[in-house]
Image: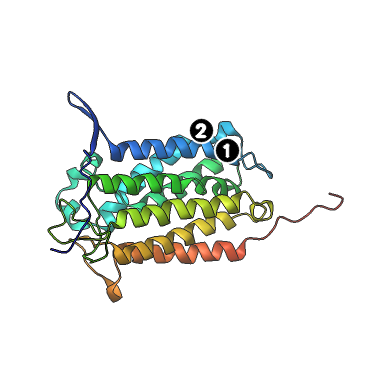
């Protein structure tokens, strides 16, 4: 066996009280939503104001439903349709695991469009502020994947390789940490730089496009080191499902950035 760093055996269950178990993965979702909510309330107030803090409060329920419903249905449709077609009762069993970011992203898009229509908000301006906090949840979620010892990387001989409990005896890339760094930390810093720049904020949809394109690139690079799901393997042209689903995001993101224009200045302003 090649040299490998021992995998830190962290109990996936943070607290267990009788039948109630609080897992790190669930805590990552909750903490990501709470921290994102807190930061979004401050970002919407930056000029030009995109919404009120109270409207951000109201949007949290919509966004949460979009994440859960979209993420679960995306996993069912994109990753294991045959299994859930044969076992439809398991579709709603979200506690057993199985969420898709791309499905969750689509769910949030639908939720935000409906919310903005109800509140008469500019959906692009509001989305620019909201998407800039999404990498917080992505960062925490990838760390939770690492704690769970799941979604590990491909076999490698790099000095920082790890042997994961469910990954066989071969040392593997800790790809969850790579993705936490790219999809979470780096993307967060980039989006915060953009959303806090007045000239960029004036270009409605630019930050949203940067998020879509930035995530697509980060996810596609991360998939180079991540072991494809056993029930899918490599797909078209040797790409993984994560890479294929990221292509439309990349195209949509580039399109949004290219079409974003500064708001027209009023005469006498």
- Measure the alpha-carbon separation of dots 1 and 2: 10 Å
Q: Which residue is tagged 1?
A: 119
Q: Residue at x 17, y 26 (%)?
A: 19
Q: Quadrant of residue 11?
A: top left
Task: Give the camera-side residue of 112 and 181.
Answer: 181
How many residues crowd mark 2 within 10 Å: few (<14), some (14–19), many (20+)? Answer: few
Question: Which quarter of the rendered picture does the N terminus lie within?
Answer: bottom left
Which tag, 1 or 2, sits closer to the chain's start?
2
In this view, the mark in front (1 or 2): 2
- Residue bearing the label numbered 2: 58
Residue 164 numbered tag: none
Q: CB atoms at circles 1 and 2 under 8 Å apart?
A: yes
> Which residue is at the far right?
268
The residue shown at (30%, 64%) is: 225
How dense is the environment of label 1, judged by Cα within 10 Å: few (below 14), some, or many (20 and up)? some
For the image, the number of numbered tags is 2
Residue 111 position, x and y percent, is 46, 44
Q: Residue at x 35, y 65 (%)?
A: 243
On screen, residue 150 versus residue 203, left or right, reads left
Q: Which residue, as the protein is rendered here, is positioned at the far bottom?
A: 237
SS at circle 2: helix
Picture coordinates of residue 4, whole percent (x, y)? 20, 58
Q: Position of residue 43 (x, y in %)?
A: 59, 41
- Asked where in the image residue 206 lies, by quadrant, the reply is bottom right
């Amino acid at each position: 066996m090649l040299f490998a760093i021992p995998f830190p055996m962290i109990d996936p269950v943070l607290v267990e009280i009788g039948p109630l178990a609080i897992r790190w993965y669930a805590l990552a979702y909750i903490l990501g939503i709470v921290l994102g909510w807190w930061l979004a309330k401050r970002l919407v107030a930056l000029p030009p104001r995109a919404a009120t803090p109270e409207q951000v409060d109201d949007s949290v329920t919509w966004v949460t439903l979009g994440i859960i419903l979209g993420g679960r249905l995306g996993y069912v449709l994109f990753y294991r349709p045959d299994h859930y077609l044969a076992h439809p009762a398991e579709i709603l069993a979200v506690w057993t695991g199985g969420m898709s970011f791309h499905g969750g992203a689509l769910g949030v898009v639908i939720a935000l469009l409906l919310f903005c229509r109800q509140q008469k908000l500019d959906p692009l301006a509001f989305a620019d502020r909201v998407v800039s906090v999404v990498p917080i949840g992505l960062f925490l979620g990838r760390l939770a994947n690492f704690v769970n010892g799941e979604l590990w990387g491909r076999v490698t001989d790099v000095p920082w390789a790890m042997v994961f409990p469910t990954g066989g005896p071969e040392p593997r890339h800790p790809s969850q940490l790579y993705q936490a760094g790219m999809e979470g930390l780096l993307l967060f810093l980039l989006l915060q730089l953009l959303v806090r720049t007045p000239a960029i904020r004036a270009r409605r949809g630019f930050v949203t496009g940067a998020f879509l394109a930035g995530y697509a690139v980060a996810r596609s690079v991360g998939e180079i080191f991540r072991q494809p799901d056993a029930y899918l393997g490599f797909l078209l042209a040797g790409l993984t499902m994560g890479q294929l689903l990221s292509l439309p995001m990349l195209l949509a993101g580039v399109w949004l950035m290219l079409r974003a224009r500064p708001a027209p200045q009023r005469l006498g302003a």
